[in-house]
Image (cartoon, grey):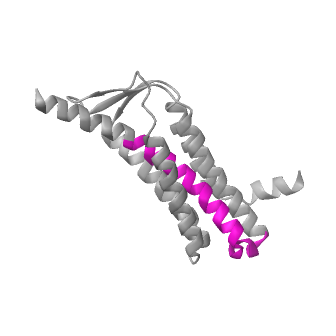
Amino acid sequence: MLMLTQILFHTPKWVFALFATLVWLGAKQLLAGSVSLVRVTLLPVVMTGLSVYGVASVFGDSPMALLAWAATAFALLGLVTQRALPASTRYDTATRRFHVAGSAVPMVLMMGIFFTKYVVGVLLAMHPELAHQVSFAVGISALYGVFTGIFVGRAIRLWRLAFQSDRATLAV
């Protein structure tokens, strides 16, 4: 318990603010609602940036880590894009907004990236030699790749719906 207290005490304040922001963003997505094409694009871009930063900031000199991240990201992207959107998902071409069902997936992904980055930071502060262990680098990088692939794959499914809806509107 003392170690956990020390870890939390030495955590910068901005980390708690980031955590609260991610919880708020994730909680908003638990409810059905309307989301713009811009937001559908922005969230995966930001989360992919955090994921890549997580790999590069710790294992940037390891080609195996970057390869593990990319391979896992593309594998999950391929799997996710094959899944159908929920039946209630709609795209309004006039307003360029999606009407989506609520989902816990974005919250889980955001928390996954956050806690992975946090735990890796703590582990590396306690055991800096881990940054040079290939198995650690590949495993953590692959985990970041999972988050990226799912986030981007989910966005691509929505972009496809928008593209198909726009094409159908133009054909009429």
Residue 160 part of the magenta-drawn span = no
Query: Would you identify the image quadrant in which residue 155 lies?
Result: top left
Residue 111 in percent (x, y) is at 61, 45
- Residue 42, given in percent of the width and then of the height, sits at 38, 47
Task: Count every numbered label the image shows and give the total.
Answer: 0
Residue 134 located left or right of residue 152 = right
Residue at 46 percent of width and 35 percent of height? 83
Identify the main secondary structure in magenta: helix
Quarter of the image where the C terminus is located: top left
Q: Is residue 144 magenta?
A: yes
Which residue is farthest top? 88
Q: Residue at x 34, y 30 (%)?
A: 98
- Residue 163 location, quadrant: top left
Where does the magenta region start and end? 127-156
Q: Measuring from the top left, give residue 17's x and y in whole percent.
A: 59, 48
Front in this rendered view, residue 132 or 114: 132
82 in relation to 1, above or below: above
Q: Percent position (x, y) of residue 56?
A: 54, 69
Hey, which residue is sitting farthest right in the picture?
2
Q: Residue at x 51, y 52 (%)?
A: 75
| Residue nearer the viewer, 143 or 36 | 143
Classify residue 42 as left or right of residue 2.
left
Kindly identify the residue that appears in the image at 53 percent across and 39 percent down.
106
